[in-house]
Image: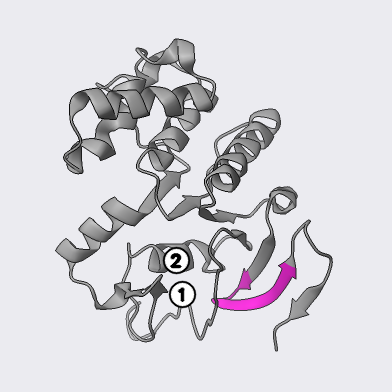
Amino acid sequence: MGQERIYAVNGISLEIEEGEICCLQGPSGSGKSTLLHLMAGLDKPTKGSITIGKTRIDKLNENQLALFRQKYIGFIFQSYYLIPTLTAIENVALPLTFCGIPPSKRNKKAMELLEAVGLKDRMKHKPTEMSGGQQQRVSIARAFVNNPKVVFADEPTGNLDTVTTHEMMQLMTSLARERKQTLVIVTHNPELSQYCTRIVRVRDGKIEKIESGRDSGHETEIA
């Protein structure tokens, strides 16, 4: 910014295990969303490395990154980002279109996911015909439809009321556990950490503290 250099993420070293449900938590401006975008390959780091599985994603070009995300990564966003002209089943099936999966197979997979998220009766509805909670269920189904290795969720319940927030968290974490997928969630809401196996607290672009979630009770202080 002008002559000032801003370090949104600075000196972070973090490993997330396969199948882990990890929560990146911190106040607004702490760098947690930037960290998630870096891990997902949406932003490139100026220094350092980011590895998913055996792939250094910071070394991939844009085309390689797009193919990598298409195959291995799912996204859930606060604002849903559904295509308004498409029905729920068409929105969920869309990622499979880019994978070259035939219409009958991708529609079948989309139907299975929509049933799993409780939208069996809303498959032909467009986003404007659904509530915010229903739209987020569609976006969750879309994120999981290609069976990704990792699902990144950036403030996925930010636009939802308290009851719907807990419904969505239960839904996302249940799907990830059933499929043994890694789930990384960014939130400023401390209540949501109860759904995670590990909580990474971020402040001023650094890791402030790492705490174990409900599966164990210890925490790690970061100097």
Q: Are marks 1 and 2 in contact (CB under 8 Å)?
A: yes
> Which residue corresponds to mark 1?
8
Task: Name the residue: 77% across, 58% down.
Answer: 215
Q: Position of residue 100 (x, y in %)?
A: 16, 40
Observer able to see residue 83: no
* Nearer the observer, 60 or 223: 60
Q: Which mark is residue 105?
A: none
Numbered disc in front, either 1 or 2:
2
> Which residue corresponds to mark 2?
34
Left-right relation of 160 to 218:
left
Query: Is residue 9 placed above or below 161 in the rendered structure?
Result: below
Name which residue type carries label 1.
Ala
Q: Marks 1 and 2, how far apart in space? A: 7 Å
Name which residue type carries label 2.
Thr
**Residue 209 magenta:** yes
Residue 110, quarter of picture: top left
Query: Is residue 123 placed above or below 132 in the rendered structure?
Result: above
* Nearer the observer, 111 or 41: 111
The magenta stretch spans which residues? Answer: 202-211
* Nearer the observer, 48 or 112: 112
Task: Name the residue: 67% across, 77% down.
Answer: 208
Mark 1 or 2, nearer chain start: 1
Of the 4 image quadrants, the one containing the N terminus is bottom left
User: Which element is circle 1 on?
Assistant: loop
Q: Position of residue 123 (x, y in %)?
A: 39, 16
**Residue 16 magenta:** no
User: Which element is circle 2 on?
Assistant: helix
Count of all numbered marks drawn on residues in the image: 2
Task: Name the residue: 38% across, 38% down.
Answer: 145
